[in-house]
Amino acid sequence: MMEKHQPQHGTMRFSHGFLAVVLLSLLFALSLSSLVTSQYVVHYYQKHMFPNASLTSSNESACNVNKSTEEFKERTEVQKAASKFNIYKTLVESLPALVISSSIGGLSDKYGRKRILIYNIFLTFLWGCLASVIIFFQINVNYLLFSYGLYSLGGGLYGALSVSFAYVSDVTNPGKLRTLMITLLEAALGVGATASGFVSGIIIDRVGFFYASVCVCAAAAFSLLVMMFCLPNSRPPELLLKGTSTLENIRASSAFYFRASPKRHKYILAIFIFMMASFSMLGKSNIEVLYQLNAPFCWKSEKVGYYSAISYSARMILGSASVKILQIVLIEETIGIISGISGMAANLVEAFAINDLMLFIVPAAGCLSSLIIPMTRSILSKLTPADRQGAMFSGIAVVEIASSMGSSLGASTVYIATVGTMRGFVFLVFAGFSFITTCLFAIYRIINRGTKTVPITDVTKEITSTQVKTDLDKGK
């Protein structure tokens, strides 16, 4: 438990900025892997399900939307098979990560952020190596599920993000600076994802899937080395929580939403907003690749990569860069409402796209759509005392993984059911979630009007840690 005389937050230094480098490289690895795997799975099924069909050739006439043709039927079957693989992949990478992430933030409160991040990124590196071996020997794609299972044992991407955002909270004070730093980390994620989009198609088209997968391993290794040798600890050992068990850490991540407190209704509404926002965004990436590979677009790897780069740069770089300007005249809740509207517009355009131009309008329409995530993180962080940031972000990671899993499973199921009739229907579903998110943020704005979103005071901060432990001991 933190003593009263101890400072809540450290002083941000230049060396703390290496966290952005770590996340940039990590997202490059993960985004590149996602693009490689999504396209490799389609390539694998085309080759093994219809080895003599025109789908496996470069014949552009095979790309049509005439439902009576054999090519259309074969392409639809491949799309369904790839969507089913996405369902299995989502379950394998999400269920273990859901359990791990429920405690990973609390463990970082106890053992330090850096140790937990090293563990997470090391498993990401091993995952990339195993996937490379499977692709090189052209082993059945179902064995890729083992690599995703290994990756999930570290908490996955969302486990890494929960610890990273807690790291930022350690070295900043509540307010606009913390909001800005959280948003800048999101921008670093966007830079990594954008870079992977630009290079993925070039690597795949020119040297194949295997060498693209090797690049995933190299990027993960670089992220791990920067973490180990350049990034300092965010808090000194004497400020780490002592005497808490793993079970207590798990329970502490959800105590904010169940323990009686003046802020509980805000916690509940904010985390529900975060959940709906995650549903509207996190299940799209794999479906978008299938959508682009399907008729009437039939994109090649290079164009898929360019679209991914433009999309990420618009949402996570340009969108994040606009935060500083928006903060001058708008509060976080209003920025969140604008972000929800942007996401809704982008999904509607994508649902009815019939040519390349319409698809490339989607990133422009959705350039502010990703802001809703850092705005909600910042709101939750400001509600939370300094010594419980890890537990709070751990709870966010659990919600993020569960939402991602539900969104991915639901999107794949909807796409399988509708790809042969209205291929863009799944994006109407995403637009619906964006609409719900926008309405909920408007409700939060009304509730929060006239009140201050600040952490629990120093007087109650010490009681909080004691009360959480007491509640856990009583089984509340």
Image (cartoon, rainbow, N blue to C red):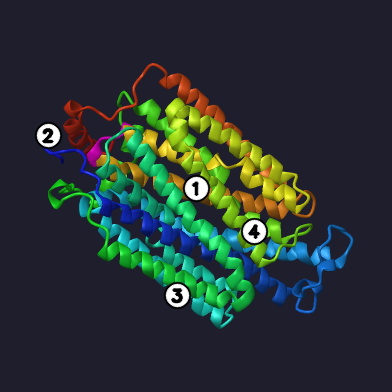
- The region drawn magenta spans 383-387
Q: Position of residue 382 (x, y in %)?
A: 32, 33
| Residue 433 visible in this rendered orientation of the protein | no
Q: Amino acid at mark 3?
A: Cys
Sequence-wise first label, 3 or 1: 3
Please say if the residues under marks 2 and 1 sit with CB atoms less than 8 Å apart: no
Q: Within 10 angstroms of label 3, few (less than 14), some, or many (20 or more) residues?
A: some
Q: Amino acid at mark 2?
A: Lys
- The disc placed on residue 334 is none
* Residue 7 falls inside the magenta stretch: no
Name the front one of labels 1 and 4.
1
Q: CA distance from mark 3 to mark 4?
A: 23 Å
Residue where numbered disc 2 is placed: 4
Q: Within 10 angstroms of label 4, few (less than 14), some, or many (20 or more) residues?
A: many
- The disc placed on residue 289 is 4
Indicate the secondary structure of the residue bearing disc 2: loop
Q: Is residue 240 above or below residue 128?
A: above
As drawn, the residue found furthest toward the right would be 68
Sequence-wise first label, 3 or 4: 3
